[in-house]
Image (cartoon, grey):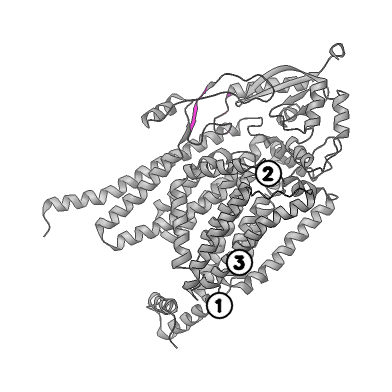
């Protein structure tokens, strides 16, 4: 018979894991709440929060009218898109019902992000049968600073990650079922192919996941991989050719040629360092588990996906790319981490109560470390500020607004803290930002023509046509694939009653022409960026 | 001929996990499952050779891109840039990993 002290000690042992699991779940659920607050703020914000959102809305509007947004950018209104249409098509029904609103695409992107997190949790649950571990894996994905920044935006990236994740999880389900039952499940594999197809036609970056899926299939059964790769490539190619034919070749120019951008090594290295610092636990756990699989068991689809996604994240160094290029790797790392930790927990449980408890503490402690690594939260309400104080974190950040067209401005207090550093994404837009957006729109409505604006939102707000897609124009200009003479003529003739600059991402001759023909009349700050409003120079001033 | 260790392990696990069903069915299922899972899989050794081949391809490619650019731009620069250094480091690592996979033989990749 055990002494009493040992019995009570045992009950403490039994209570400790629950305490740690509860703490980890609480903190990651808090991140989910933060995510929800940010998403809710964005859903009610009627202008571009991230540069490019408005052009995604324009693509959606065009598709809702049955038009393809891959057009001749040399001709008025000089508009074209560089992204495939699946995400926009998913938003089209909402635009039909509710009109061209920013919240439509943000909602679809948000739902896509939540589905991805659920798929991650499901993948871990299938393998570990521990609900709390599965929940933590899914929540750890949502808690990533990058997922937080990009998830609720009107951008197609997270929708692509959703299809990628669904494809790989389904691939694992199919192969496990096939190996268990000893027969092929082609219908299941067809669903995988469908998800891969949709991922690629949501955003081109999904090619890496397509490669990972086929590498996995090849390792398991080379002949079968080739048998599936040929028709898959055929369907993708025929679709590509059909869209290209329907757009007189502008699909190829705008989605492929325009995306060949200069590579900036410093940008890639900086982003890799930041990604590693923010997701250290996930990266270590996933990498060690992938190495373990390489040497001691068969490579799983998740491990191959993770490695390929990390390698592909190098493309984040391209001009115009950024942190979102790491999100696929984060999704794969979250799944691998969950499964690896499940193995550790099983190992601990097999070695008795004490080892079982210690391994649970170890795993939950690692999740808590990961939660600390990605710390981010708005502090714009007294309760949120108090929480930050209680966690011994800063309650505000001081940064200067970004500007490309005005004198530098002094630092301002931002009620948002982020371990990734406070940039433009993450802080919640407020009433002041909406008022600023309305002021800029008022400048557009004062004129008779649409504005030559770097954000689409101001023209959309006052029902004017959207003129050009600046970053796409710049990409094509840098690749020598655009003739800007008509656009230059309209600018020198001062045919646009308003010009609105944000980051001045236009080709240099366009900027020079605007500088020679327009004067700045107002500087308006919105979402941490100084927007410059310009009107045609009066004849008296040349 | 004696089966390799991983195959024997597979047989053993397969039989153990199917305890409770009829012996005849167990044998059939396990044989079928084993045949299915081991169906012309890529082995660790083949994967290692593949890694080593890729590393050579990357190394050649890292230098070939300079050659290609110089033939286009008529300005050959023999300096190795940061991206090339990263590519060569990656290739060296890949070659090493490939080398270490060779002794693992016919185990499935």
Camera-nearest residue between A177 and A418: A418
Numbered tag placed on residue B39 in the rendering: 1
Does the CB distance between marks 3 and 2 fall below 8 Å? no
Vertical placement of A515 versus A41: above or below? Answer: above
What's drawn in magenta, residue-wise? A413-430
User: Badge 3: few (under 14), some or many (20 or more) residues near its Cα, within 10 Å?
Assistant: some
The secondary structure type at the circle numbered 3 is helix
Q: Is residue A166 visible?
A: yes
Residue A424 located within the stretch drawn in magenta: yes
- For marks 3 and 1, the one nearer the N-term is 1
Q: Which residue carries the number 3 mark? A: B53
User: Badge 1: few (under 14), some or many (20 or more) residues near its Cα, within 10 Å?
Assistant: some
* Residue lying at 44% horizontally and 62% vertically, measured from the top left: A292
* Residue lying at 55% horizontally and 21% vertically, measured from the top left: A411
Which one is closest to the eye, mark 3 or mark 2? 3
The x and y percentages for residue A201 are 70, 52
Horizontally, is A40 left or right of A255 in the view? left
Which one is closest to the eye, mark 3 or mark 1? 3
């Amino acid at each position: 018979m055990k002494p009493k002290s040992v019995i009570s000690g045992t009950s403490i042992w039994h209570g400790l894991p629950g305490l740690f699991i509860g703490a980890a779940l609480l903190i990651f659920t808090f991140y989910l709440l933060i995510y929800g607050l940010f998403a809710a703020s964005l859903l009610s914000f009627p202008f571009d929060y991230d540069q490019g959102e408005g052009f995604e809305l324009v693509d959606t509007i065009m598709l809702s009218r049955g038009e393809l947004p891959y057009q001749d950018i040399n001709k008025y209104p000089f508009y074209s898109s560089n992204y495939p249409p699946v995400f926009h098509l998913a938003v089209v029904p909402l635009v039909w019902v509710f009109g061209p609103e920013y919240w439509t695409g943000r909602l679809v992107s948000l739902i896509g992000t939540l589905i991805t997190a659920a798929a991650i949790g499901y993948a871990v649950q299938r393998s570990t049968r521990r609900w709390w571990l599965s929940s933590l894996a899914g929540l750890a994905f949502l808690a990533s600073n990058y997922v937080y920044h990009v998830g609720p935006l009107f951008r197609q990236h997270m929708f692509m990650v959703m299809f990628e994740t669904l494809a790989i999880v389904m691939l694992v389900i199919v192969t496990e079922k096939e190996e268990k039952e000893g027969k092929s499940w082609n219908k299941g594999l067809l669903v995988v192919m469908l998800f891969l197809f949709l991922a690629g036609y949501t955003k081109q970056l999904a090619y890496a996941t397509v490669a990972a899926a086929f590498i996995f299939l090849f390792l398991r059964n080379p002949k079968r991989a080739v048998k599936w790769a040929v028709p898959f490539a055929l369907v993708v190619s025929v679709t590509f050719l059909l869209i290209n034919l329907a757009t007189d070749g502008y699909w190829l120019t705008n989605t492929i040629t325009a995306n060949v951008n200069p590579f900036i090594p410093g940008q890639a290295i900086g982003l890799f360092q930041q990604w590693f610092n923010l997701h250290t636990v996930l990266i270590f756990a996933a990498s060690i588990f992938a190495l373990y699989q390489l040497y001691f068991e068969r490579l799983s689809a998740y491990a191959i996906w993770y490695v390929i996604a990390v390698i592909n994240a190098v493309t984040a160094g391209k001009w115009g790319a950024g942190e979102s290029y790491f999100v696929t790797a984060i999704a794969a790392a979250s799944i691998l981490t969950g499964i690896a930790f499940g193995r550790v927990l099983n190992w601990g449980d097999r070695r008795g109560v004490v080892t079982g408890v210690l391994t649970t503490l170890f795993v939950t402690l690692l999740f808590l470390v990961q939660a600390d690594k990605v710390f981010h939260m708005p502090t714009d309400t007294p309760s949120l500020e108090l929480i930050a104080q209680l966690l011994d974190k800063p309650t505000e950040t001081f940064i200067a607004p970004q500007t490309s067209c005005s004198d530098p401005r002094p630092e301002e207090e931002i009620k948002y803290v982020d371990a990734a550093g406070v940039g433009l994404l993450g802080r919640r837009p407020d009433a002041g930002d909406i008022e600023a957006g309305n002021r800029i729109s008022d400048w557009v409505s004062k004129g008779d023509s649409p504005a030559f604006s770097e954000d689409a939102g101001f023209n959309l707000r006052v029902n004017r046509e959207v003129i050009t897609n600046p970053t796409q124009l710049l990409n094509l200009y840098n690749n020598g694939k655009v003739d800007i003479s008509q656009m230059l003529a309209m600018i020198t003739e001062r045919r646009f009653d308003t010009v609105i600059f944000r980051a001045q991402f236009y080709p240099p001759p366009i900027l020079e022409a605007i500088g020679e023909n327009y004067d700045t009349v107002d500087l308006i700050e919105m979402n941490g960026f100084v927007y410059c409003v310009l009107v045609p120079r009066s004849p008296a001033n040349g | 001929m004696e089966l390799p260790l991983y195959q024997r392990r597979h047989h053993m696990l397969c039989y153990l996990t199917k305890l409770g069903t009829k012996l005849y069915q167990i044998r059939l299922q396990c044989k079928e499952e084993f045949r299915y899972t081991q169906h012309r899989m890529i082995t660790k050794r083949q994967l290692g050779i593949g890694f080593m081949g890729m590393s050579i391809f990357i190394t050649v490619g890292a230098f070939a891109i300079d050659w290609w650019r110089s033939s286009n731009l008529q300005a050959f620069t023999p300096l190795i840039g940061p991206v090339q250094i990263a590519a060569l480091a990656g290739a060296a690592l890949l070659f090493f990993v490939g080398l270490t996979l060779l002794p693992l033989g016919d185990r499935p990749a």
